[in-house]
Image: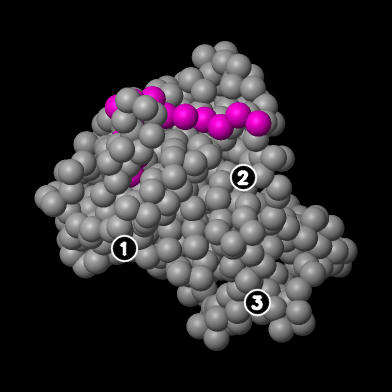
């Protein structure tokens, strides 16, 4: 018994001594609070400030070592990623983008951390809180910025960037110079920041999506996510405007084992400047994608006929039928996109290899000179309804196909063969000569999206 008593006394002494090993948690009053209505600020203060602010809000049991060390580490890490005490000093667009990310982390169950809520139930974000935050953000209400078409023209196709000379990212990931030849995986209309996203995949990714072999994606998979700022024409249709960036995910479970099996990189602007200041930028990528680790860290729902036993992993609804169409345009290259907000549709213009080679060589409009597709080119405009992206609040993705239009370019360089398929299921719809000419001209005159 005496030995047990001595051990207990030693344990108590060690526990008391450990309480003295207490590195500080810096704290300060809020200096620049986010610019938002009082109701939204109250929600953020209640649910987020314990970790994501300079205020010190620890419960009594958080003060007890060794738990204190874990809490301190979590708080300092949270502040580094997002600090609501200083967020108000950043541009309004940055503040809204941060709130969108916060709303998505909450929606996906990644924030607040489940283990934190288990001990701090007052930090739980109620459905009413999340609904209020979404109502304030209200994507698509602001619309796309209107930019004159001439301001979006690339003045000379010879100004295209030498993709083979683009420097690697700061984590060592090389630029994927062949990305423009990859095939489409999906498309996104981002109402949170008024951008379009085209997600392309290399052959390994395309074959994996077609087979439903995406849990996990196989080694060698490469994705390119290309973003353009949206611009609206006089009729309210929205098209890709200026090029924003291209992001890459490269799967190699061994090489990138420290970053969830994926290599990450982002290059911004037509000069393709690496995004990071140092290799620590990868933490931003992995942190954003961690809520979808159950989908191998991939947000995108690939458009495929392959089925999955889990819900919202693939997008079967947007797949085109394997019969009745003269071509399968989802295997072609992407020329451009468009959205009709009034009809709630999203469309993509695809081109066969002949058309895409012409786009690559000289597909950018120049002042006073229209681009013409050579004979043998085939274009296809696929129009889908839109639905909310289940993985990202503020984004919409293709839903059920509404129509598929084809134009074949003849030896005279004109649309000599127009065919339209619409309805559910898609069936050929015969149109008059006048409509055929109008729609052919419309497809042939859609300006290719700007690429570096």
Where residue 400 appears, as percent x and y from the top left, is 29, 64
Look at 35% across and 60% down and name the residue there: 384
Q: Which residues are magenta?
A: 368-380
Q: Nearer the viewer, mark 1 or mark 3?
A: 1
Q: Name above or below for residue 308 compared with residue 390.
A: above
Question: Within 10 angstroms of label 3, few (less than 14), some, or many (20 or more) residues?
Answer: some
Indicate the quadrant where residue 45 lies: bottom right
The residue at which mark 2 appears reads as 241
Q: Can you say whether 2 is above or below 222 in the image?
A: below
Question: Count of labels shown?
Answer: 3
User: With 217 as the anchor, is 211 left or right in this view?
Assistant: left
Q: Position of residue 303 (x, y in %)?
A: 29, 51
User: Which quarter of the figure has residue 307?
Assistant: bottom left
Mark 1 Cα-neighbour bin, 10 Å: few <14, some 14–19, many ≥20: some
Of 382 and 83, nearer the camera is 382
- The image quadrant of residue 334 is top left
The residue beneath circle 1 is 402
If you read the primary sequence from the N terminus, does the residue marked by circle 1 or circle 3 appear first? 3
Instruction: Measuring from the top left, give residue 168's x and y in whole percent.
Output: 56, 21
Spatial separation of the CA atoms under disc 1 and disc 3: 31 Å
- Name the N-terminal-most of marks 3 and 2: 3
Badge 2 element: strand
């Amino acid at each position: 018994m005496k030995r047990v008593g001595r051990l207990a006394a030693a344990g108590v002494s060690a526990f008391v001594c450990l309480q003295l090993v207490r590195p500080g948690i810096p704290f300060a009053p809020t200096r620049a609070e986010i610019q938002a209505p009082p109701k939204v600020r109250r929600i953020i203060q209640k649910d987020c400030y314990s970790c994501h602010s300079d205020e010190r809000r620890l419960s009594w049991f958080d003060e007890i070592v060794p738990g204190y060390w874990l809490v301190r580490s979590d708080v300092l890490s949270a502040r580094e990623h997002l600090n609501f005490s200083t967020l108000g000093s950043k541009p309004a667009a940055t503040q809204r983008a941060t709130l969108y990310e916060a709303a998505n982390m909450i929606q996906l169950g990644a924030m607040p951390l489940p283990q934190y809520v288990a001990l701090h139930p007052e930090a739980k974000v109620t459905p009413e809180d999340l609904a209020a935050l979404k109502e304030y953000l209200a994507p698509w209400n602001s619309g796309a910025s209107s930019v004159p078409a001439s301001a979006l023209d690339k003045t000379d196709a010879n100004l295209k960037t030498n993709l083979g000379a683009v420097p690697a990212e700061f984590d060592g990931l090389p630029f994927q110079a062949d990305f423009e030849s990859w095939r489409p995986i999906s498309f996104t209309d981002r109402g949170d920041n008024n951008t379009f996203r085209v997600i392309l995949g290399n052959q390994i990714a395309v074959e994996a999506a077609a087979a439903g072999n995406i849990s996990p994606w196989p080694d060698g998979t490469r994705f390119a996510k290309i973003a353009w700022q949206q611009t609206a024409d006089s009729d309210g249709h929205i098209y890709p405007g200026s090029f924003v960036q291209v992001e890459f995910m490269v799967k190699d479970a061994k090489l990138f084992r420290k970053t969830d099996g994926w290599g990450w990189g982002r290059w911004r602007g037509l000069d393709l400047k690496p995004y990071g200041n140092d290799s620590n930028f990868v933490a931003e990528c992995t942190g954003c994608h961690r809520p979808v680790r159950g989908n191998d860290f991939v947000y995108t729902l690939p458009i495929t006929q392959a089925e999955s036993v889990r819900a919202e992993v693939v997008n079967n609804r947007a797949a085109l039928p394997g019969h009745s169409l003269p071509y399968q345009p989802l295997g072609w290259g992407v020329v451009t996109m468009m959205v009709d907000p009034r009809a709630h549709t999203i469309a993509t213009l695809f081109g066969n290899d002949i058309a895409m080679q012409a786009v690559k060589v000289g597909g950018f409009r120049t002042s006073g000179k229209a681009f013409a597709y050579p004979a043998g080119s085939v274009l296809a405009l696929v129009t889908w309804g839109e639905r909310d992206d289940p993985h990202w609040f503020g984004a919409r993705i293709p839903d059920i196909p509404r129509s598929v239009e084809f134009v074949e370019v003849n030896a005279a360089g004109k649309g000599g063969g127009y065919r339209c398929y619409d309805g559910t299921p898609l069936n050929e719809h015969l149109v008059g000569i006048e409509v055929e000419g109008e729609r052919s001209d419309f497809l042939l005159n859609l300006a290719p999206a700007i690429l570096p």
